[in-house]
Amino acid sequence: MPAILLLNGPNLNLLGTREPATYGSTTLADVEVRSRATAERLGHTLEAFQSNHEGALIDAIHAAGKRFKAGELLGVVFNPGAYTHTSVALHDAIAGVAPLPVIEVHISNVHAREAFRHHSYVSPAAAGIVVGFGVAGYDLAIEGLVRKTAKA
Ligand code: CA2
């Protein structure tokens, strides 16, 4: 069974250590453990990568595209953090490896926050979007990815 890649962008390594009112008190390590359990329950392995660097995230998406082509990867669950609202380069990276399915996740409801969080450069290239369910959104995104890619 192909693997699922869980990708997290800038500052998400701080999850569970600050701003609990917005992001909760679960750490990124906890999220990765829970996501792995969800993926395995659905018959997939999970690989996790976090970076604070835009180029490293782009490289990870390019590598995921190659592995998707080789049949080794089902898709990507991606929280691009603040790069969501700034990065044409991430948009182009995801569009450039189509049809690799990328599910965009946001822990908080970005639409209920500051106006600068309302626009996403990633969303037009994403296969699906999960917003505002707290860290449970990662599990919902894994489930959505598996359902979306299920062979009839
Ligand atoms: O709601 C989300 O998941 C976000 O992608 C999180 C980003 C934010 O810039 C987006 O607008 C929405 C911020 C990630 C920073 O995470 C932290 C977690 C704990 C403490 C400090 C930062």
Image (cartoon, rainbow, N blue to C red):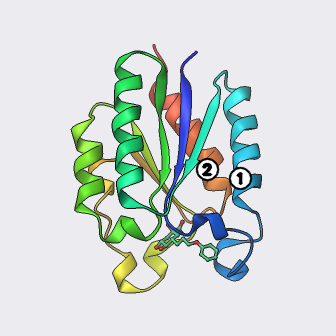
Give residue 86's mark: none
In the rendering, at what x and y percent does residue 107 appear?
Answer: 58, 64
Residue 86's place in the image compared with 46, above or below, is below
Q: Residue 55's quadrant in the figure? A: bottom left
Q: Residue at x 52, y 71 (%)?
A: 109
In the rendering, at what x and y percent does residue 134 appear?
Answer: 65, 64
Residue placed most toward the observer, 119 or 95: 95
* Residue neighbourhood size for the residue with mark 2, other residues' Cα within 10 Å, grouped as few (<14), some (14–19), many (≥20): many
The quarter of the picture where the N terminus appears is top right
Q: Quadrant of ligand 1?
A: bottom right
Q: Residue at x 77, y 70 (%)?
A: 25
| Label 1 or label 2, whichever comes before in sequence order | 1
Mark 2 sits on what residue? 138
Seen as rendered, the residue at the extreme bottom is 114
Give residue 31's mark: 1
Q: Residue at x 76, y 64 (%)?
A: 26
Q: Marks 1 and 2, how far apart in space? A: 8 Å
139 vs 26, left or right, is: left
